[in-house]
Image (cartoon, helix red, strand yellow):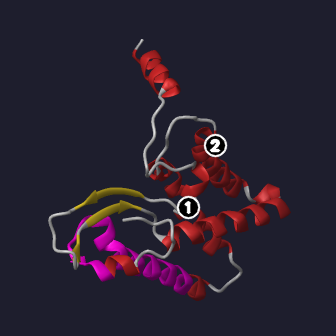
Amino acid sequence: MLQNHIWKYHSTLVATHPFSSEWYQWLLATKPLWAYYDNSLPSNLRSTIAYLGNPVIWGLGLLALAYLLIVALKNPKDNLSSFIVITSYISSIVPWMFIGRIKFIYHYYLALPWLYIAIAMAIDNLRLKQGLKEKVAMTVSSLALIMLIIYYPAVSGLTVSAKYINMLKIMKSWIF
C-alpha cells in the first residue's frame, strides 16, 4: 500500500523548480542545483552550495564509456565486463528519461560509480606499458583532486570572495 502511495504521488506530481533539470543536462552538469546561499554576507563575499559534478570525472567518464563501447563492439567475447559497466550506467539513467515530474542533478549520482569504473577500465585497457598506465591513472586522479579543491568553496558553503565563485562558473547555465 505504501509503495502504491509513493508511486501515485510521484507519477502525478505537478511542480516546477528553477533548478530542476532533465537527464541529458546531468551528463555534463550543465544545470547544477543551487542548494544554499548566505545572503547575510557583504557583497564581496559569497557562501554557496551547488550540486555539480567534477568536470574531470564526468567528462572523462563519458569518454571512457564511449571507448569501452568501441573496444567491446570490436571484440564482444573478451569484453563482457565492459558491456556490464555500460549497461549498468545506461540502466541508471534510462528510467529518468520517462519520468515526467521534475528531476534534479542528484538523481544522476547513481550513475557516478559506473563512470569511475569506466575510467579505471579504460586506462587498464589502453595498450600502454604498466608504468605508463599507472602514470595516466595518477594524472587523472590528481586532476580530479585538483578540481575538487578548486570547486570546494562552491560545493561546501565555504566563505570566499564573490570574484572567486564567479570565476568557477565555466558555463553560462551555472547559477550559484
User: Does 157 lie within the magenta span?
Assistant: yes
Q: Main secondary structure of the magenta part?
A: helix
The image quadrant that residue 118 belongs to is: bottom right
Q: Residues within 10 Å of mark 1 (few under 14, many from 20)?
A: many
Asked if 152 appears above or below 78 in the picture, the reply is below
Give the numbered dot on residue 94.
2
Mark pair 2, 1: CA separation: 15 Å
User: Does residue 174 appear anywhere in the picture?
Assistant: yes
Q: Which residue is at the front of the view, 81 or 66?
A: 66
Q: Residue at x 67, y 84 (%)?
A: 128
Q: Which residues are magenta?
A: 134-163
The amino acid marked with disc number 1 is Leu
How far across and down, in percent of the image, does residue 4 sit? 47, 16
Residue at x-position 23% and y-position 68%: 47
Magenta includes 115?
no
Query: Could you say whether the residue bearing mark 2 is in a helix, strand or loop?
Result: helix
Q: Determine the residue located farthest toward the top in the rendered image.
A: 1
Position of residue 162 measured from the top left corner of the image (x, y, whole percent): 28, 78
Q: Amino acid at mark 2?
A: Val
Mark seen at residue 115:
1
**Disc 2 or 1, which lies upstream in sequence?**
2
